[in-house]
Image (cartoon, rainbow, N blue to C red):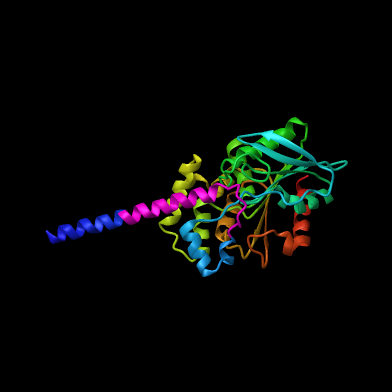
Amino acid sequence: MKLFKDRKNYIKAILFIFIIMNMIAFFHAHKFTHFTEKQSEKTKSPEKLSSLGKIKTLCFGVNNPKPHNTKLPSQEYKTLKLKSNKEIECWIIKTPNSKGTVILFHGYNSEKSSMIQKSDEFIKLGYSTMLIDFMGCGNSEGNQTTIGYKEAEEVKTTFDYLSRKGERNIYLFGTSMGAVAIMKCINDYKIQPKGIIIECPFGSMYQTLCARFKKMNAPTFPMAGILLFWGGVQNGFWGFSHNPSQYAKNINCPVLLLYGEKDKSVSREETYEIYSNLKGIKILKIFKNTGHENYLIKNKTEWAKNVSVFIMKIQ
């Protein structure tokens, strides 16, 4: 009788812990994929948090105020609103005698003004540019982000807009989440850009969540999987299928894949797998002493050279 009672109490304890873990994961998933209008201080990246800060973040989730554009292009530009799955805002910068147009897509928790510096580099090469606010970011509609999943439709919307305007030389540039959205768009909608330049895309949504837990010095199992499950449920998709390494198998256009060797958010193994799965002309460039960051900070000259050589090669 005592053994039966002990076993019953043990099962109750396990069930209680499981419920608590799911409640925490549900709360975290919502905060991670939904921005708030309240402009509280954004939670720092995990490697910049103190031990107390990491514990607080693990318990209560991230502070995720909606990212707003912080500056404007120095060139003359046009603001455009496009209807996609959400209404998105874009900036178009026309270059005289343009060789084509590069559409730029930002990363997670960012917005189109973060792409101005890279837009300037493409303008120097003789290209017009189009900078995009993904849904929930900048001046686009909503407060939701799906880490590249639903954003893929917005990539298609901007590509189709330029195609209808008669642009034939369309290049896509994306960093992190923006790179993932580009890859998913090509996989799902079979668009055919002239070429794509992608920086540090993750191999799978599960892997990128595991990386966040590791940076917090927290075990990945089982919370990463539970968090991914609830994130998908809340946002209307199966998170375990969000795998850019698999999208790569359906990408046949020329690709320049850029990666920082000290990236703690995306592993070298993920990058090599993506590169291996790409089907067309492809180039992999790894920057030394560089993490998951703006590559122009430490590698501007090298970055510009690699981009220029790539575009010239596929023209």
In the image, 76 versus 42, the foreground residue is 42
Magenta stretch containing residue 30, yes or no? yes
Q: 172 or 63: nearer the eye?
A: 63
Question: Residue at image x 59%, y 66%?
Answer: 48
In the image, farthest residue toward the right: 96
Q: Is residue 120 left or right of residue 61?
A: right
Query: Going 70% across and 59% down the picture, which residue do you hit?
Result: 295
**Residue occupying the far top of the picture:** 164
Magenta segment boundaries in residue numbering: 16-43
Point 43% across, 54% down: residue = 24
Residue 229, position as x, y percentages in the image: 44, 47
Report whether 135 appears left or right of 227: right
* Prevailing SS of the magenta stretch: helix
Q: Position of residue 27 (x, y in %)?
A: 46, 50
The answer to whether residue 32 is visible is: yes
Can the viewer see residue 310 in this picture?
no
Residue depicted at x 44% and y 63%: 219
Quadrant (top left/top right/bottom left/bottom right) for the N terminus: bottom left
Residue 237 is situated, as x and y percent measured from the top left of the image, at: 49, 40
110 sits to left or right of 59: right
> Which is more toward the observer, 77 or 267?
77
Q: Compared with residue 52, is residue 228 higher up or lower down, i.e. above or below?
A: above
Quarter of the picture containing the C terminus is top right
Residue 132: x %, y % from top left: 70, 43
State the residue lying farthest toward the left: 1
Judge by depth and name the residue closer to the eye, 247 or 172: 172
Taking the magenta stretch, the answer to whether it contains residue 27 is: yes
